[in-house]
Amino acid sequence: MSDIKILDLEQLKALIEINSRINSNYSDINALLVYILESAMRLVHCESSSLLLTNKEDESLRFVVALGPKGAEAKNVLVEKNSIAGWVAENNSPLILNNVSSDPRFFRFVQDKTGYVTRTMIAIPMCVKGTCVGVIELINKINSKPFDNEDLRILELLSNQAGIAYMNANSYRSAQDKISVLSSQIANGSEYHSFVAKSPVVLDLLHIIDEVSKTNTTILITGESGVGKELFAEQIHLKSPRADKPFIRVNCAALSPSLLESELFGHVKGAFTDAVTDRIGRFESADGGTLFLDEIGELPLDLQSKLLRVLQEHRFERVGSSVTVSTDVRIVAATNRDLEKMVSEGTFRSDLYYRLNVVPINIPPLRERKEDIEPLASFFLQKFSIETKKNFRYFSEPAWKLLFDYYWPGNIRELENSIERACVLGTPPFIQVDNLRINYDCQDKKDDFETLTEEVVTESGDRTLKTAVNNFKAAYVRKILNETGWNQTKAGKILGIQRTYVSRLLNELHIR
Ligand SMILES: Nc1ncnc2c1ncn2[C@@H]1O[C@H](COP(=O)(O)OP(=O)(O)OP(=O)(O)O)[C@@H](O)[C@H]1O
Ligand SMILES: [Mg+2]
């Protein structure tokens, strides 16, 4: 006791100030850890320092923050268990080493890599309720002095507070993450759709899905627009052991490349101008569950490489961060584009294509599985009868014939839209052929224009120019999509806009 002096007033003031600052803001864990290290160096003057965090799963330690010369090189390096930090973490006890190079536990990797020599070191556990959550290492006390028990004592006071602050910040982050997952599920429409099928070809596909769902294999779903790719993806998730975990949908065409990157991988505060707080991405939201990457053909090349790495290593970094995050996510991707052609044209990475295409599921268009028309039409009739509060019983004979004979270029989506419209316009108990408004014989242009104008005026009570323009846009884009069988690429060409813009308009203007 005699060699340890009582804290002087300045040290006490510094400790109180540090303590209140580390507990004042938990929103940025990285900034908190940097501040903890800076504070340690303020209390005990030394050349450099590092902070390692313990990984709960395998008890490994990783350098998360390193300050001083060559700090950058140490960052993110994984440290062995029989190292100095490993010993401190395992024994939950500090170490003072004034001749580091003679200690067999010294982990030389960083020194060998950078040439920066560690002479003296003090290493203290950050301990919360008896468990070590990390280790603070201070290196080379200034003026070649040795570290002593007085340094240790004040650092222990700091590290206890730091451990608690770190755990609080972690709880805060995981609460924020849960809120973000839940709000994105609400915004995303997390509910699943009813799946209707009768045709042998679809029943066979469901059988294949039963089998592959049990595994973690990546699945690529292809098929024309509106055939039900998203519903198949839902079935894969619901039949898998991941069913009670999140099913997260991301439409790769709906966001600009930079927003898409942060949507998928998350970002840390300050990664770009609008990144005012840390945010988890969909990969983290989907942890334990399934991530559905819709319109995968629209994924820009640089994000294709990043996705490939996640598929291979199950790891990634949030935008603006160097901390690696592990993830356990099953990927289901979908596209109505010809990925093989894109590979040959160099717009889609071949290695990613093969990695995604482990189990390909191609969904045939509705016209090739006419057995599904009857159950689907009945299902939609019932659904929209309830929604429109009209008691429709069935289709008239000619309406029925039209449903069977029509080519359905927009597949099930077009069938669904057509029956919805019929329920809105028709009079119970039967849906008549005219109510379906199927463009079977191609009406003349005048009719089309009148229909469009009608939709613009009647769709909303709001008569402002802005609303009318938006209504017109929606009606016109819908018309062109109907003409092209809801093929967004073809529609984009006719409309003179990019396909990704067509997709964005679909979302923004709620075009169905
Ligand atoms: N088997 C089915 N049973 C019931 N409804 C279905 C079925 N298949 C598709 N639908 C409905 O048809 C519409 C289109 O389906 P979905 O969005 O899955 O198609 P998609 O292939 O993903 O289309 P796109 O390529 O345009 O994204 C949805 O409203 C969906 O609910
Ligand atoms: Mg889709």
Image (cartoon, helix red, strand yellow):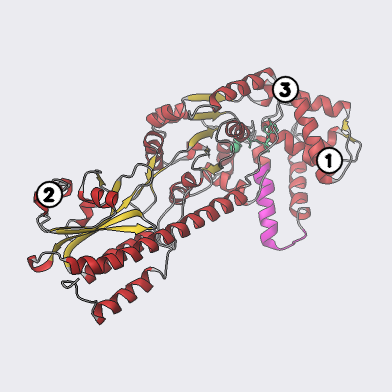
**Residue 385 circle label:** 1
Mark found first going from the N terminus, 3 or 2: 2
Residue 508 rendering spot, x and y as whole percentages: 61, 51
Q: Which residue is mark 2?
A: 103
Q: Is the CB of mark 1 within 8 Å of ligand 1? A: no
Q: Out of 73 and 225, give the one closest to the viewer.
A: 73
Q: Residue at x 47, y 38 (%)?
A: 329
Q: CA distance from mark 1 to mark 2?
A: 79 Å
Disc 3 vs disc 2: Cβ atoms closer than 8 Å?
A: no
Q: Secondary structure at mark 3?
A: loop
Q: Quadrant of ligand 2?
A: top right
**Residue 198 circle label:** 3
Q: Residue 462: within the magenta?
A: yes
Q: Secondary structure at mark 2?
A: loop
Residue 151 rendering spot, x and y as whole percentages: 20, 68
Mark found first going from the N terminus, 1 or 2: 2
Residue found at the very far front of the displayed protein: 1
How many other residues sit within 10 Å of disc 3, few (<14), some (14-19) or many (≥20)? some
Q: Out of 89 and 202, give the one closest to the viewer.
A: 89
**Front disc: 3 or 2:** 2
